[in-house]
């Protein structure tokens, strides 16, 4: 097997389908062809340790979610570095070393809509459980699955790259999961609860610092590969006195989609 851009893109697709183990196995077949061999072996070892603990019930639900999120995002970082390597760019040393700059983004408004939105999600979930609708086709359904770049809007009307996220969504389903990393603050986040309803999408998030909250956005129209999410920390779970932020999520151009 040869290390190619096509192979790396297929590994990104596997990751978007929650097949992290398969993606790592494919990369190990070409480990001798990349300068990132040690980083790949390190990531494979971390995944094996995580899988062992997960199989034996040694991880809590939060530990499982955050550990999986960190490995998936490091794998995305590795795939991106290997793509650049194939283009002749300089190899990055200590690929998984946390960035030194940990400055944080400060928002203006401090408020939370979590109780209202959680109630809406619960009512919606119950309606799905007890009132079965006729089967529908996938026509008109929104496909959010894949890798998304995250940006902060700036005061001068521009954008600042903030991180990266992966959305896991099975075809023709109104439920999804999202995980990612805010690069500037080096904080992982994840969400096991996400849904699409009446043109809006919602997901409840938590991060490794113990913050919890909810994000809401308008579902992107067909052909539009970005959306703006407004996120609110739950009262009592705001650790950095920034209870509200706005994020722009744009489908990662490196996916070639």
Image (tube, grey):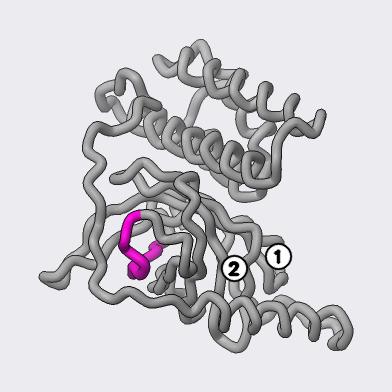
**Residue bearing mark 2:** 143
From this view, report whether residue 83 is shown above or below residue 120: above
Residue 5 x/y as whole percent:
46, 35
Q: Is residue 100 magenta?
A: no
**Helix, strand or loop for disc 2:** loop
Quadrant assignment for the N terminus: top right
From this view, report whether residue 97 is shown above or below residue 145: above
Tag count? 2
**Residue bearing mark 1:** 171
From this view, report whether residue 194 is shown above or below residue 210: below
From this view, report whether residue 242 is shown above or below residue 223: above
Crowding around mark 2 (Cα neighbors within 10 Å: few <14, some 14 to 19, many 20+) is some
Q: Is residue 155 left or right of residue 120?
A: left
Residue depicted at x 31% and y 18%: 93
Residue depicted at x 50% and y 34%: 75
Q: Are discs 2 and 1 less than 8 Å apart at CB?
A: yes
């Amino acid at each position: 097997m040869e290390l190619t851009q096509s192979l790396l893109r297929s590994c990104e697709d596997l990751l978007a389908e929650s097949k992290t183990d398969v993606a790592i196995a494919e990369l190990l077949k070409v480990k001798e062809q990349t300068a990132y061999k040690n980083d790949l072996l390190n990531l494979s070892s971390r995944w094996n340790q995580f899988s062992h603990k997960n199989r034996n019930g040694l991880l809590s639900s939060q530990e499982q979610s955050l550990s999986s999120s960190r490995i998936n995002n490091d794998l995305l970082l590795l795939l991106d570095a290997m793509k650049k390597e194939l283009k002749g760019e300089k190899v990055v040393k200590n690929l998984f070393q946390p960035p030194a700059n940990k400055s944080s983004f400060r928002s203006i408004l401090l408020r939370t809509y979590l109780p209202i939105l959680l109630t809406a999600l619960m009512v919606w979930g119950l309606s799905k459980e007890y009132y079965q609708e006729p089967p529908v086709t996938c026509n008109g359904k929104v496909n959010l699955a894949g890798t998304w770049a995250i940006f902060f809007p700036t005061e001068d009307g521009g954008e600042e790259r903030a991180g990266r996220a992966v959305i896991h969504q099975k075809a023709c389903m109104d439920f999804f999961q999202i995980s990612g990393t805010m690069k500037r603050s080096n904080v992982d986040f994840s969400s096991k609860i996400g849904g699409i309803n009446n043109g809006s999408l919602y997901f409840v998030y938590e991060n490794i610092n113990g913050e919890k909250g909810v994000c809401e956005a308008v579902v992107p129209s067909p052909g539009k590969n970005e959306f703006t999410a407004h996120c609110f920390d739950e009262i009592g779970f705001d650790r950095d006195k920034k209870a509200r932020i706005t994020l722009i999520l744009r489908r990662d151009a490196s996916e070639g989609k």
